[in-house]
Image (tube, grey):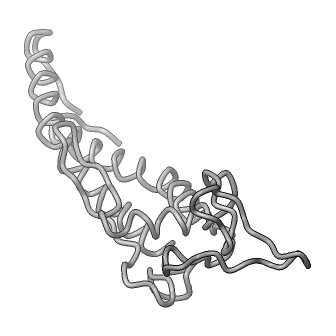
Amino acid sequence: MATFKSFKEFGATVEAMNKAIERDRKLWALEMAKRAQEIATAQASADLGGDPKFSGWKPPLDTHIKPIPTGAVLLPTRSGAGPWTVANQGRHTGNAGGFSGPGVNRSTGLTARTKSGGLRKVRATKGRRWNGVTKGFHTADKAVTKMELELPIIGQRGLLRTERQFFDVS
């Protein structure tokens, strides 16, 4: 147990510990971001059948760590942002700004139908194809839930390591 001869000596130790916490904070944040990246990749792999990629899609569900002044942030890559959104929310789930299906007319934005009610082929050019509606897996939501459970423990461990350099902390 640390014993101090004066409050001034105690204050100097606390100040030194605060400087060490500020110095080590980015290291803890980087450690937390790396663990978050592992969690995100594992969750994407679990939801998409073994690898973090949709079958037939070129871009995988990738993430990268961006350092910021107060620590680090986990973000999807530019090519991985779309697949992450589809994995989380689904595709063409509604409220998509008037996109109505394969027979959408470019000038009116409505779906063209024949007399019998079938879809009319109105596209002269092969534009954006209709791949149907897919339900999301809530991949990012599940990953964030796991991160909220695991990452604070990493931060607490880092803080405890730094505190132990200055005080007897259990």
In the rendered image, the residue lying farthest to the right is 116
Q: Could you tell me residue 97's position as x and y percent?
A: 61, 51
Q: Is residue 58 left or right of residue 129?
A: left
Task: Name which residue lies at 22% across and 53% down.
Answer: 66
Q: Could you tell me residue 76's position as x and y percent?
A: 35, 61
- Nearest the viewer among 164 and 45 is 45
Task: Name which residue lies at 63% across and 69% down.
Answer: 137
- Nearest the viewer among 43 and 120 is 120
Q: Quadrant of residue 105?
A: bottom right
Task: Name which residue lies at 64% across and 67% down.
Answer: 136
Q: Quadrant of the C terminus?
A: top left
Q: Quadrant of the N terminus?
A: top left
- Nearest the viewer among 120 and 74 is 120
In the rendered image, the residue lying farthest to the top is 7
Q: Is residue 161 left or right of residue 140?
A: left
**Total number of numbered labels?**
0
- Nearest the viewer among 70 and 141 is 141
Q: Work out whether 2 lies above or below 24.
A: above
